[in-house]
Image (cartoon, grey):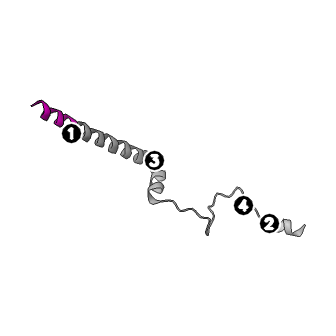
Amino acid sequence: MEYSKDIIINAYSSKKETGQAKIKESKIIKLYKKHKIIATMCAICGILILLDCILVYNFVELLQTIA
């Protein structure tokens, strides 16, 4: 009975485990979690810029085939 009183279970602890079981997060994931709105806006802007470059390239190719 004394042994069961000595056991401390941290089931509801918000601290991460230390040692071998600790999972390391990459810097990109930490940055995204800290600045979600700015990171999402940057990702959307990057996708739109890439799409714009593709569309301009295809338009120039289309003009070259017509002329």
Q: Return the residue at label 1.
A: 57
**Chain part drawn in magenta:** 58-67
Counting residues from the start of the chain, the first of labels 3 and 1 encountered is 3
Asked whether 28 or 6 is in front, the reply is: 28
* Residue that extends furthest to the front in the rendered view of this protein: 65
Give the CA distance from mark 3 to mark 4.
Answer: 30 Å
Residue assigned mark 3: 36
- Mark 4 residue crowding within 10 angstroms, few (<14) / some (14–19) / many (20+): few
* Dominant SS type (magenta): helix
Helix or strand or loop: what does disc 1 sit on?
helix
Callout in the foreground (3, 1): 1
User: Between disc 3 and disc 4, whose residue precedes?
Assistant: 4
- Which mark identifies residue 10? 4
Confirm whether the magenta stretch covers residue 63.
yes
Badge 1 crowding class, 10 Å Cα cut-off, few under 14, some 14 to 19, many 20 or more, is few
Contact, mark 4 vs mark 1 (Cβ under 8 Å) = no
Give the residue type that dot 4 points to.
Asn
Q: Residue at x 85, y 66 (%)?
A: 5
